[in-house]
Amino acid sequence: MKINDVLRGKGNQVVTISPEATVTELLALLAEHNIGAVVVSPDGSSVAGIVSERDIVRLWNGTPEAGDVRVSAIMTAEVRTCTPDELIDNLMRLMTEHRIRHVPVVVDGALSGLVSIGDVVKSRIGELEFEREQLSNYISS
């Protein structure tokens, strides 16, 4: 199974935020969309970074005016990305090795989707259920 198969099921919509936005704006965006990470992009297409709940927690732990901090100050600038044609198994390996839960999908330098660990797990469960059903049908016939 490829990443494109996951995107086909969940869609290609990606929530982005400007690097100049504040953490308060970031929190509102995460809550509004009920998500755990946002791609940081100055134009909605390029990937300048990624910021997650973990980044906010690290900041909040000891910063009295954390809400006024710019997203660019807490984002991860070295973003691991993938393409739609890559295998889910490779993405799982990437997420495990680098301890990341969200990976932007990029095509020709432009953002085209975002895959979370939850998307990967859901996809894998679907594959396993299909295999179980096929084996069950084979045994029954």
Image: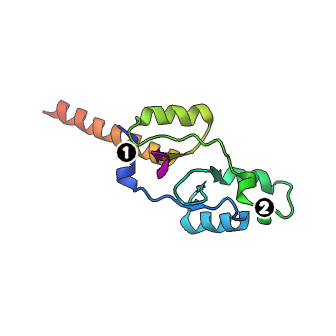
- Image quadrant holding the N terminus, namely top left
Q: Tell me if residue 110 is in the magenta stretch.
A: yes
Label 1: how many Cα within 10 Å (few below 14, some 14–19, many 20+):
many
Q: Residue at x 77, y 65 (%)?
A: 67
* Image side of residue 95 versus residue 128, left or right: right
Q: How is the image coloured?
A: rainbow
Q: Residue 134, how many percent across, how many down? A: 23, 36
Along the line of sight, which residue is nearer the eye, 19 or 7? 19
* Image side of residue 81 versus residue 107, left or right: right
Query: Would you say residue 129 is visible in this rendering?
Result: yes
Q: Residue 92, how many percent across, how many down? A: 49, 35
* Image side of residue 71 versus residue 116, left or right: right
Name the element at disc 2.
loop
Residue identified by numbered label 2: 69
Q: Quadrant of residue 37?
A: bottom right
Q: Which residues are magenta?
A: 106-112
* Secondary structure mostly taken by the magenta-highlighted segment of the chain: strand
Name the element at disc 1.
helix
Along the line of sight, which residue is nearer the eye, 122 or 78? 78
